[in-house]
Image (cartoon, helix red, strand yellow):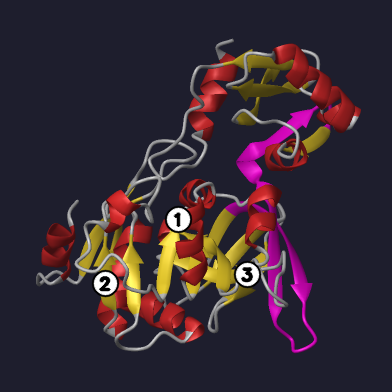
């Protein structure tokens, strides 16, 4: 979808429009959302970040998904100057910025996925441009320790977002740098979070969600602050739980433990096991499975160690850069 196509849809007489989920856990599905709630979401974010009329906002993500759409809506709500470049893995490259009337114009606000930030950090010139952005929000995928460490000393605010298509982008932020750096997400005003019986996060956000209570598949932990606010951190997804011999293991926790040691892209998944119910599987782009196995045996607890390893030419990902969990699971089950 082009910017012109989205603006035409936004300004038509319909009070709603259709957005699609990212498809990280399966096939993308369409969702009908209210434009009024999208404006509410935009207002909440702009107020939280202190964005003002005339500030610049970089649009560098596809308009097919909620993250890109909401950047445009925020620019409409707050009268921001929208700087639009073609979505790519290197949004601050000379080629990308050549689309702008003034490639050297300062950027107040930008939203990127982790892969875009990772690529940008590898290029010195692009990295310096990234540091000048006053508010950088990163969403659409997990931020590993290595990426977080590279951002911790940035001079301006860098945020990790929590949200989903159903909440019209994010409903909580956490700082990745500075004195406010934290593992815990702070929900926006008007958003209440709790846990259900499965330990999964539930969200009440009437300003942005049509559902009175949204139940996620994210296993979370809550923390009460001295001021009475409830913060949370995500441990993993319920559907990414491996139940092996009665021991429940989160795929994301194993991945976090291995990221400092495995260079090639990889993912943890599972497949059926007659004796234990399920077993841990590691899918990797590395051709040296013996080396990968040795690292796992050295760095992981025994019950976290994969029972099966497989090399693939390219790890399946979604259009927004997330691991395509359903496709990875299919690879494991067919191996």
Frontmost of labels 2 and 1 is 1
The outermost residue toward the front is 125
Looking at marks 2 and 3 on the same chain, the residue that comes earlier in the sequence is marked by: 2
Tag 3 residue: 174
Report the span colored magenta. Answer: 217-246
Q: Judge whether 192 appears above or below 176 on screen.
A: below
Residue 273 position by quadrant: top right
Tag 1 residue: 126
Mark 2 to mark 3 CA distance (whole Å): 24 Å
Which residue is located at x 34 percent, y 66 percent?
Answer: 58
Q: Name the side, left or right, on which 181 lies relative to 210.
A: right
- x and y percent of residue 103 in the render? 28, 64
Tell me, yes or no, whether the highlighted magenta stretch contains residue 229.
yes
Mark 3 to mark 1 CA distance (whole Å): 24 Å
- x and y percent of residue 86 in the render? 26, 52
Looking at the picture, tell me which residue is in the foreground, 170 or 265: 265
The outermost residue toward the top is 335
Looking at marks 2 and 1 on the same chain, the residue that comes earlier in the sequence is marked by: 2
Q: What element carries label 1?
A: helix
Tag 2 residue: 82
Residue 41 position by quadrant: bottom left
The quarter of the image holding the C terminus is: top right
Tell me, yes or no, whether the highlighted magenta stretch contains residue 209.
no
Q: Name the side, left or right, on which 245 lies relative to 142.
A: right
């Amino acid at each position: 979808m082009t910017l012109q196509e989205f603006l035409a849809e936004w300004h038509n007489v319909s009070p709603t429009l259709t957005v699609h989920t990212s498809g990280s856990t399966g096939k993308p599905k369409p969702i009908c959302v209210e434009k009024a709630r999208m404006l509410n979401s935009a207002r909440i974010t702009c107020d939280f970040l202190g964005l003002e009329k005339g500030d610049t906002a970089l649009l560098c993500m596809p308009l097919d998904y909620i993250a890109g759409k909401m950047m445009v809506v925020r620019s409409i709500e707050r009268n921001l100057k929208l700087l639009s470049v073609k979505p790519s893995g290197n949004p601050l490259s000379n080629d990308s910025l050549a689309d702008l009337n003034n490639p050297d114009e300062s950027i107040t606000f930008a939203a990127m996925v982790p892969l875009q930030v990772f690529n940008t950090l590898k290029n010195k010139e692009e990295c310096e441009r990234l540091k000048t952005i006053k508010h950088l929000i990163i969403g659409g995928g997990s931020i590993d320790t290595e990426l977080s460490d590279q951002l911790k000393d940035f001079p301006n605010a860098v945020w990790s977002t929590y949200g989903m298509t159903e909440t019209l982008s994010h409903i909580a932020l956490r700082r990745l740098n500075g004195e406010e750096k934290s593992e815990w997400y702070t929900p926006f005003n008007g958003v209440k979070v709790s846990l259900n019986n499965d330990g999964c996060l539930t969200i009440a956000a009437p300003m942005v969600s049509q559902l009175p209570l949204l139940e996620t598949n994210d296993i979370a932990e809550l923390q009460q602050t001295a001021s009475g606010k409830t913060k949370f951190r995500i441990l993993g997804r319920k559907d990414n739980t491996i139940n092996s011999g009665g021991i429940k293991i989160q795929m994301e926790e194993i991945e976090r433990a291995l990221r400092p040691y495995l260079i090639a892209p990889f993912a943890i998944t599972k497949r059926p096991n007659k004796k234990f119910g399920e077993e841990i599987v590691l899918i990797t782009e590395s051709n040296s499975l013996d080396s990968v196995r040795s690292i796992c045996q050295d760095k992981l607890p025994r019950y976290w160690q994969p029972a099966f390893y497989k090399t693939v030419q390219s790890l399946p990902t979604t259009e927004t850069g997330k691991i395509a969990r359903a496709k990875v699971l299919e690879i494991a089950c067919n191996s």
